[in-house]
Amino acid sequence: MMDDSLVTMASGTEISTADIDSDGEFLDPDKISKYKLAAGMATLALEKATEASVAGAAIHQICSVGDDVVSEELAKVYNRGQVEKGPAFPTCVSPNNIVAYNSPGAENATTAAKGDLLKICCGVQVDGMIATIGTSVVVGGPGAASEPSTRALQATRDAAVVVNSMLKPGTKSTDIVKAIAAVAAAYGCEPVGGVCCGNMKRFVPVGNKRVLIRPVEAGETCPHKEFEIEDSEVYDVDIAMSTGSGLPRMGEIPTTVFRRDVHRKFNLRMKAARHVYAVVDKQFPTMPFAVRQLGMPKARLGIKECISQEMVFCYDTMYERPKEVVASYRFTAIVRSGKTTCLTAPAIAIPGGAGAGAGSGGEEGAGAVKSPLADTDYGPIVARSSVPTSFSW
């Protein structure tokens, strides 16, 4: 049944479901400093997970590297007083044609291979201020990238640059979708269906302003209303480009990432399910989590009843067609009327040096793609961007 009660954090902080559903919030200097603190931790975790992404490394081990860094960094701050802190999104590593949300446990023996295109993302929250981050990395370095991977990487990066330039009060969500589609078409790619950009609030990773990055097909109804970006909003921008159709499907790997539905209450019947829900309620009351983070042998069994009773949202592991690749880029930004602040700007290395900015004259290597946006309205925006190509920025 639906519930409009209080949600209690591990620190004792309580927020109402009415606050979760409300519009906007005031961003004072203290909140902004906590957003930046969370962003720094998320960036470091992504950096270390990226360094661990070498040929032969188990995917679940790369995920653990990112999660461990988050835990270590959080242990250094706010150890006195009632300040909630924790992961805001589990480290996910999604190879090649897997779109996102792949965060397996040790039972999954999949390893990274040279030339694989890995999408890595994670998130951190400090006092409910959330920072998410994600990038794409080619195992073995940019030189090991295939031509399709190079196109997907460049399209993703350039779309992220364009969207970042549009994050200002008054921009319509539909205009963002059109811009992403234009960049994708220029590289012969497709925006991935089901991937969203949207606002976040304190303790709320999924706000009430959401936009699907892929235009709705003819005859379909968009599940999200058009909106305008407003001052002092925080956005989780997630861009994913595919060399395939952009219409992913469910695969054989079971869903590993979930988020509690704070509006739902139900008397679970299975002991394993009650145990799982108790842990989720305490450790991840509003944030997404991976089953492996629960640290219990029957977590997979227990989560099944939570799913059937709709007490959790599923972040399904979706697949493009075999031999196609998907690249993604994810960042967090605070919209201000004066200047938008990009809290997380993950590194992304483009083969041939194109990551320094499309049309910037980077030395071309094997598989390098000259920006087809140079002569469009988006060309100058991309050319003057400062997206880093490595984490030494």
Image (cartoon, grey):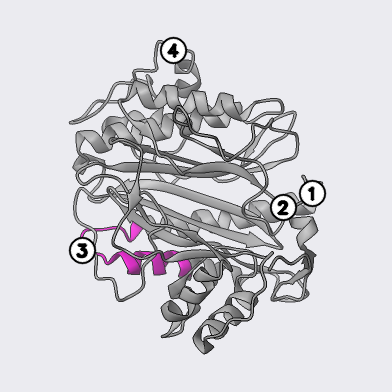
Q: Position of residue 117 (x, y in %)?
A: 28, 47
Q: Residue flagged by tag 2: what amino acid is it? A: Ser
The x and y percentages for residue 103 are 39, 64
Front position in the image: 89 or 47: 89
Q: Which residue is mark 3?
A: 56
The answer to whether residue 319 shows anywhere in this view is: yes
Instruction: Please provide percent x and percent y for residue 284.
Output: 60, 70
- How far apart are the alpha carbons under marks 4 and 2? 37 Å
Q: Are marks 3 and 1 in contact (CB under 8 Å)?
A: no
Mark whose residue sits in front, 2 or 3: 3
The reply to whether residue 237 is in sight is: no
Asked if residue 55 is among those painted magenta in the image, a careful observer would answer: yes
Q: Tell me if mark 2 has few (under 14), some (14-19) or many (20+) residues whose alpha carbon lies within 10 angstroms of its own.
A: some
Against 117, residue 44 (above or below) is: below
Residue type highlighted by circle 4: Thr
Label placed on residue 29: 1
What's the distance in space between the residues labelled 1 and 2, CA to CA?
6 Å
- Which numbered disc, 1 or 4, marks the residue that appears first in the sequence? 1
Q: State which tag comes first along the sequence, 4 or 3.
A: 3
Task: Give the residue at x 78% y 50%.
Answer: 22
C-alpha gap between disc 1 and disc 4: 38 Å
Which segment is the magenta one? 51-67
Mark 3 secondary-structure assignment: loop
- Badge number at residue 33: 2
Q: Residue at x 64, y 26 (%)?
A: 172
